[in-house]
Amino acid sequence: RARLSSARRGAEARGGARRRDSLVRRADAAMDGASADDGGFDARGDAESDARGAAAKRPTNAFARTKEKDPYKRLGIDADATSEEVSSAFNYLIREHAGDERGVEAIEAAYDKVISERLSTRKMQKGLRKMKKEKNKDGVDYDAPLVQRVKAMFAKPDQQTLIRRTMLYVIISGWAIAAPATSGPAFQMACAFGTCVYFLNEKRGGQGTLGKAFRDSLIALLLAWLVGSIVPVYIPLFPQGVAPELILALFSFVAMWITCTFLK
């Protein structure tokens, strides 16, 4: 009985040792597998990091016309390009320079400016067509505001007044032409200027209007001198023997005739 008990304890001890060895081997195998998995994960992480670094180091196709002020030149198109050409140029540049943030902003700003200008032009043309239709419909001529303002400053006189003042300035002009060249048309200029001031003052009622009549006559005289000094140089209106003083006087007579006859 004692030998049987001793043999049983020996068998149990050997079985426990074998189980411990098996558990140790399994634990070692599990640790080796975990190490392999960690190595694989690290390798994948390193590969992804390398890929991101390569993408970051890849050169960007920078947009070279960011400082170009003309939106059409910035987009690389002509000013008369169609809407389809504008859109095609915009889409192409956005694709080509997608990595350049400043370039993309410059392209978008140029595109927005072109579209805004074209919308404004279209609205203006639409408004002009509408006014033209209204004019044709109502039978009323439409003039620009500046033309309307200029027209409001002048009025056609009656036929008798027109004939009298025309004859007066024709006589003064003939007198200046017939006068000797040595004396010049200074006296005729003074007569024409004084006549213009008188007619303007009379037309406006003569109550505190003398200063304005003098001012308007002086402006007409200065403009006539300016035009008479420039136009004959480029347009040969007079023979070569005509003195420059006489040419200025003739232009002045015409300007003062218009002023005292048609100006309100």
Image (cartoon, rainbow, N blue to C red):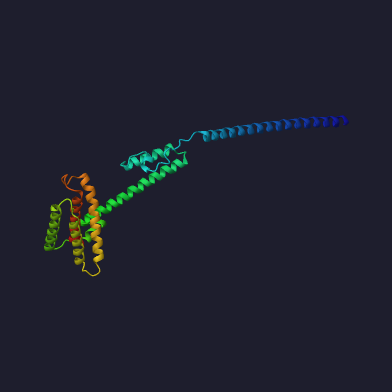
Left or right placement of residue 81 versus residue 64 in this view = left
Residue at the spot x=41%, y=45% of the render? 109
> In the rendering, at what x and y percent does residue 182 appear?
18, 51
> In the rendering, at what x and y percent does residue 64 appear?
43, 37
Residue at the spot x=46%, y=42% of the render? 102
| Residue 138 in view, yes or no | no
Give the image quarter of residue 71. Answer: top left
> Which quadrant holds the C terminus?
bottom left
Residue at the spot x=44%, y=44% of the render? 105
Give the image quarter of residue 130. Answer: bottom left
Q: How many marks?
A: 0
> In the rendering, at what x and y percent does residue 157 appear?
15, 62
Q: Is residue 146 above or below residue 77?
A: below
Q: Nearer the viewer, residue 171 or 112?
A: 171
Q: Is residue 104 above or below residue 247?
A: above
> In the rendering, at what x and y percent does residue 198 appear?
19, 64
Q: Nearer the viewer, residue 122 or 238?
A: 238
> Which quadrant holds the N terminus?
top right
| Residue 201 in view, yes or no | yes
Residue at the spot x=62%, y=33% of the render? 42
Toward the front, the furthest residue is 182
Left or right placement of residue 146 versus residue 2 in this view = left
